[in-house]
Amino acid sequence: FDKELLTLRNNRWKKAFNENDEWTPDLKATIVIEHIIQAADVAHTMQHWHVYQKWNEKLFFEMRKAYESGRGGEKDPADTWYNGELWFFDNYVIPLAKKLHECGVFGVCSDECLTYAKQNRKEWEMKGRLVVESMCKKYRELEIKECAELDITEGENEDAEDSSN
């Protein structure tokens, strides 16, 4: 997550929508499109809790696998996921949903995005620690299953090689 880029985008938004400088409608439209693209990237956070959870889990598994293979940073995502999601809602998702609501680009749907973002943040605050614990358990179970399937496949390959000799 690039905090400098977020600051740059926030400053451009403020200039375009809070100050009446030399910003043309085309520049405002460009900034709105940038924010729509950002919203598309995190749209799961602005939908029903179950949709948010589905995609959050997929991202967690991806980050955990990257960490375990040495491609994902110094910290286990499980150690920071709960607080990281709260920070993400407070500093990225909810402010983004507010901006989309403010510019009116989605009409009444922007109300829904903002409402779901706030609800998901609140639910994450209450349930997030248990959700992380559950995702870790599920990840381990899937990892064990994959290892077992790999062992079976390797055993079948060895049997096939033995019978061909």
Image: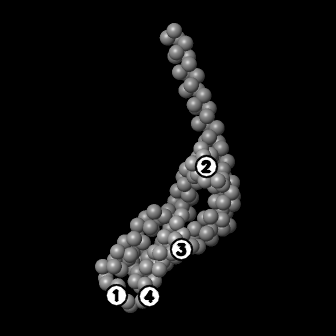
Q: Residue at x 59, y 36 (%)?
A: 146
Residue matched to label 3: 94
Q: Which residue is mark 4?
A: 18
Relative to residue 20, is residue 97 depicted above or below? Answer: above
Residue ID at (52%, 11%): 163
Instruction: Sort mark 3 into few (<14), some (14-19) or many (20+) by Cα contacts within 10 Å.
Output: many
In the image, which disc is placed on residue 67? 2
Q: Earlier in the sequence, mark 3 or mark 4?
A: 4
Q: Position of residue 27 (x, y in %)?
A: 33, 79
- Mark 1 lies on a secondary structure that is loop
Dot 1 corresponds to which residue?
22
- Nearer to us of marks 1 and 3 is 1
User: Which labelled disc corresponds to residue 137?
Assistant: none
What is the spatial separation of the Cα atoms under label 1 and label 4, in whole angstroms?
Answer: 12 Å
Task: Measuring from the top left, give residue 96's x and y in whole percent.
Answer: 49, 74
Tell me how far mark 1 sits from mark 3, CA to CA: 28 Å
Using the numbered discs, state the Cα–Cα distance from disc 2 to disc 4 in whole angstroms.
41 Å
Task: Specify the amino acid type for callout 1.
Answer: Glu
Which residue: 37% across, 72% down? 33
Instruction: Please tell me whether mark 1 or mark 4 is closer to you in this view.
Output: 1
Q: Quadrant of the N terminus?
A: bottom right
Cα separation between marks 1 and 2: 46 Å
Q: Which class describes the residues within 10 Å of circle 4: few (<14), some (14-19), or many (20+)? A: few
Q: Dot 2: what SS?
A: helix
Amino acid type at mark 4: Asn
Which residue is at 54% across, 61% downward?
52
Up/down of 99 relative to 69, above or below: below
